[in-house]
């Protein structure tokens, strides 16, 4: 439940079943956005998450300011795969799918 005057933004990383592809995004409703990616996969097969079947949440960060969230998303997108893996492993060492835990 959101409290009046608070803002919630998230950057998140999704992966496919084989954990071979990473997708980084930003949203103000993490649960809804993850469901959206999966439920709309057949509607837009050209979308990155649909094409590579990235529906599994493995990492997220919370922010109160959208500008900071967007800057963080861009920062992580610019990183190497190895640096992204290190970030994920510090948060979720087994790369467990977190969809049902949020």
Image (cartoon, rainbow, N blue to C red):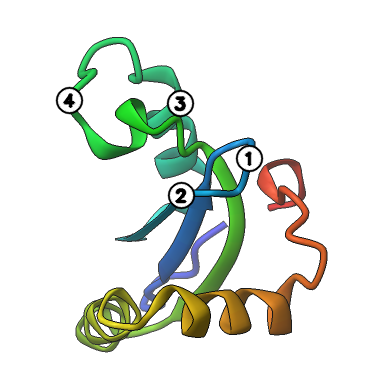
Closest to the observer, 20 or 36: 20
For the residues labelled 2 and 1, say whether their Cβ atoms are less than 8 Å apart: yes
Q: Is residue 86 left or right of residue 7?
A: right
Q: CA distance from mark 2 to mark 1?
A: 8 Å
| Secondary structure of residue under mark 3 | helix
Q: CA distance from mark 4 to mark 2?
A: 15 Å
Q: Nearer the viewer, mark 1 or mark 3?
A: 1
Q: Is residue 100 left or right of residue 64?
A: right
Identify the residue under disc 2. 21
| Secondary structure of residue under mark 2 | loop
For the residues labelled 4 and 2, say whether their Cβ atoms are less than 8 Å apart: no
Identify the residue under disc 3. 38
Q: Which mark is residue 18?
A: 1
Identify the residue under disc 4. 46
| Labels 1 and 4: the sequence-earlier one | 1
At which x and y percent is residue 34? 47, 40
Residue depicted at x 22% and y 86%:
71
Residue depicted at x 63% and y 36%:
17
Quarter-wise, where is residue 43 in the image?
Answer: top left
| Labels 3 and 2: the sequence-earlier one | 2
Q: CA distance from mark 3 to mark 2?
A: 15 Å
| Secondary structure of residue under mark 4 | loop
| Labels 1 and 3: the sequence-earlier one | 1
Q: CA distance from mark 4 to mark 3?
A: 13 Å
Q: Nearer the viewer, mark 1 or mark 4?
A: 1
């Amino acid at each position: 439940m959101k409290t009046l005057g608070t803002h919630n933004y998230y950057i998140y990383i999704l992966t496919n079943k084989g954990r071979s592809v990473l997708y980084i995004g930003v949203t103000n409703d993490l649960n809804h956005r993850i469901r959206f990616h999966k439920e709309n996969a057949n509607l837009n097969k050209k979308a990155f998450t649909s094409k590579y079947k990235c529906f599994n949440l493995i990492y997220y960060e919370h922010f109160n300011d959208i500008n900071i969230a967007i800057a963080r998303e861009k920062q992580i997108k610019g990183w190497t795969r190895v640096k992204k893996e290190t970030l994920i492993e510090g948060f979720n060492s087994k790369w467990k799918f977190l969809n049902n835990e949020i």
